[in-house]
Image: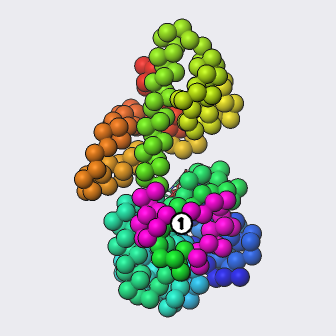
Amino acid sequence: MATIGFIGLGNMGGPMLANLVKAGHTVRAFDLSADALARAETAGASRADTAAAAADGADVVITMLPAGQHVRAVYMGEGGVIGAARSGALLIDCSTIDVDSARAVATAASDAGLLMVDAPVSGGVGGAEAGTLTFMVGGPDAAVEAAHPILEIMGKAVVHAGGSGTGQAAKICNNMMLGIQMLSVCEAFMLAKRLGLDAQKLFDVSSKASGQCWSLTTYCPVPGPVPTSPANRDHAPGFTATMMLKDLKLAQDAAATNDAATPMGAAAAGLYSLFCNQGHGGMDFSGIIRMIDGQS
Ligand code: NAD
């Protein structure tokens, strides 16, 4: 069993930590939020007073933080993880961040004699609680191999995407597809309504035809066809529109700096930005059908 430092104990990090404790690992928790720290203690972790204290002497350090600037600060800032971790320790960043930050931190870790992977997740809070996340992992083979048994406790699938930063690349490419597909499904249901075509009938056809996709068959934005989708609970999240917008912006920034034309991704980012600016950022991202349908 390993000693694990866990930093960032929010909606995702909290339940991920709980699964590591349940598996028998010794976990030292750190967060800026006293409430999050208290929840981690209740789950069976011990409290660290700083990020460096969580990392000091640990075999593994895991972070689940909001964005690139937090990850850079926690790893590379004064009193950061890279300065505190023991030689040969394994660092796993599960946050969704920009590829450049992921690569900068991985280089600093490697220069300090540490193993590091970027391992963003898909599966949301439900997946974090159930231990069924999908990890997209970027990093050198030795680091990915070392991370595998730890990630398997928190997830059901671990995909090695390539070198450092490619886990983040996979995450933003996937979520750009998701955002665009959700909007396409919303537009189709809106048009069907205007044409007098019943939503269930469109679902029955398209779920078996070429329009089939996850946004339709698992996460249908209208109530009825998929009883477990957020549409059946007034579009309560789920995965918030704010989170979708964050990932679409990461994709747009990456596209701009890597000479990639992503006009559909740009349109999706614009539409989600509008939806969030209308005050709906806390709604599930499938709730954008209300705006597409002229209801908000
Ligand atoms: P959250 O805001 O609930 O949690 C982030 C935690 O990090 C907070 O508790 C905050 O206090 C802590 N934190 C911030 N700066 C810190 C610092 N310098 N030192 C220590 N702690 C610090 O966010 P979340 O929903 O848990 O998401 C975490 C990451 O996972 C994000 O990058 C997000 O994009 C990604 N993600 C979230 C979901 C989801 O459904 N929530 C799904 C997939 C991926």
* Residue 160 within the segment the image draws in magenta: yes
Q: Which residues lie in the magenta part?
A: 145-170
Q: Position of residue 251 (x, y in %)?
A: 36, 50
Residue that appears at 64% across and 53% down: 127
Relative to 142, does residue 163 appear above or below in the rendering? above
Q: Which of the pair 137/234 is nearer the observer?
A: 137
Instruction: Tell how many labels.
Output: 1
Q: Position of residue 104 (x, y in %)?
A: 34, 73
Name the residue beneath numbered marker 1: 160
Residue that appears at 61% across and 22% down: 205
Relative to 217, does residue 176 appear above or below in the rendering? below
* Mark 1 C-beta closer than 8 Å to ligand 1: no
Q: Quadrant of residue 163?
A: bottom left
Relative to 171, 13 lies left or right: right
Q: Position of residue 219 (x, y in %)?
A: 59, 36
Colour pattern: rainbow
Looking at this rendering, what residue extends furthest in the bottom direction? Answer: 87
Q: Quadrant of residue 179?
A: top left
Q: Quadrant of residue 100?
A: bottom left
Residue 271 appears in the rendering: yes
Relative to 41, does residue 230 appear above or below in the rendering? above
Identify the element where label 1 is drawn.
strand
Residue that appears at 41% across and 88% down: 112
Q: Position of residue 233 (x, y in %)?
A: 64, 31
Q: Which of the pair 122/290 is nearer the observer?
A: 122
Residue 67 appears in the rendering: no
* Residue 154 within the segment the image draws in magenta: yes
Amino acid marked by disc 1: His
